[in-house]
Amino acid sequence: MTEQVLDRYDVVVVGGGAAGLNGALMLARARRSVLVVDSGAPRNAPADGVHGLFAREGVSPVELLERGRAEVRSYGGHVVAGEVGAVVREDAGFAVEVAGRVVRARRVLVASGLVDELPDVAGLRERWGRDVVHCPYCHGWEVRDRAIGVLATGPMSVHQALLFRQWSDDVVLFAHTAPAPTDEQAEQLAARGIRVVGGEVAALEVVDDRIAGVRLVDGSVVARDTVAVATRMVARTGFLDALGLRPVPHPSGMGEHVPVDATGRTEVPGVWAAGNVADLSAQVGSAAAAGAAAGAHINADLVVEDTRLAVDAYRAPFSAAAESRVAELVAGNRRHGL
């Protein structure tokens, strides 16, 4: 860590993406001491641009995060590169292991994002974020009118194919290892002109550094230039094991997340979560909004604690004076034989 790091902070934010930086921005502007620990591995790193983000449409993910870090620092927040090894409960808050040292925090905001687990198909990982995509709202405009193949991975794949049909009239659903569409789904796909190709997919055919087709295990190739696939998304939370906070299956079946309430509060007192770690489908804008909301609620929670501590301190002199007066009365009574 090259940036100076304090021993104690009001809040440590784990994750330097949209949720973490916006949460830190809210906290820093609230005059809280805040440390953001950024692993430097954003989920959207392979993407050329961020989409669907008001007033920043198409901005490079790298540029967006650089601006965010600078904004947090401009209000006195600290942002460091590194990994969080563990978060442990202490009497006054938490001990956070950051790049080989321990930092104390009164509260923790988890914005560590998630990991996309791709099917074991040759070529998928190498093309991920380029011509292998997952979200039509993130990439649909960029792949409009192309020959799109949707690789079925689970119960949401038919829905994914129907969504991509909004951007192209040439969509093929590869059944792969997923269950066959139900009769109702087959009718919907047929009505929208989406062909279903049975058989397991073996690999992507790549020509001149572009997808040219999808090859099945039987050797046949279906010409495609874009492949959409729903990943299994798993929250990054290994550093929370000591707190007993672990991801649980998401109701959609899309992966695992950390459940939170409307404020971002987790089941562990003092720990909030925001962004993809809590909401698997959150785009950059909604992740940033969740981070801002969590930051505001964390500050409000700290205000309650600060006020309680201030009241205790305010009462202390009066309590001491009262005790002294009682002691004087007792001593006087003893002198008078009472």
Image (cartoon, helix red, strand yellow):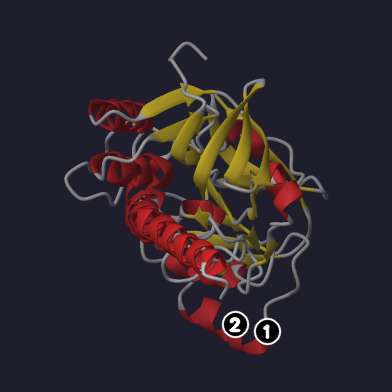
- Front residue of 50/6: it is 6
Mark 1: few/some/many CA within 10 Å (<14, 14-19, 20+) = few
Does residue 297 appear in this view?
Answer: no
Q: Do the residues labelled 2 and 1 touch (CB within 8 Å)?
A: yes
Which residue is the site of mark 2? Answer: 185
Which residue is the site of mark 1? Answer: 182
Residue in the image at 33% along x and 40% along y: 32
Mark 2: few/some/many CA within 10 Å (<14, 14-19, 20+) = some
Residue in the image at 34% along x and 30% along y: 77
Residue 324 rendering spot, x and y as whole percentages = 44, 57
Quadrant of residue 158 within the rendered picture? bottom right
Residue 324 appears left or right of 120 = left
- Front residue of 43/39: it is 39
Quadrant of residue 61 within the rendered picture? top left
Residue 157 rendering spot, x and y as whole percentages = 60, 67
At label 1, the amino acid type is Thr
Which residue is the extreme one toward the front?
Answer: 336
CA distance separating discs 2 and 1: 5 Å
At label 2, the amino acid type is Gln
- Front residue of 139/193: it is 139
Which residue is the extreme one toward the bottom?
Answer: 184
Vertical order, 202 against 45 (above or below): below
Callout count: 2
Residue 282 rendering spot, x and y as whole percentages = 44, 57
Residue in the image at 52% along x and 61% along y: 331
Residue 9 rendering spot, x and y as whole percentages = 45, 35
Which residue is the extreme one toward the right?
Answer: 218
Which quarter of the rendering shows the C terminus? bottom right
- Mark 1 lies on a secondary structure that is loop
Quadrant of residue 31 within the rendered picture? top left
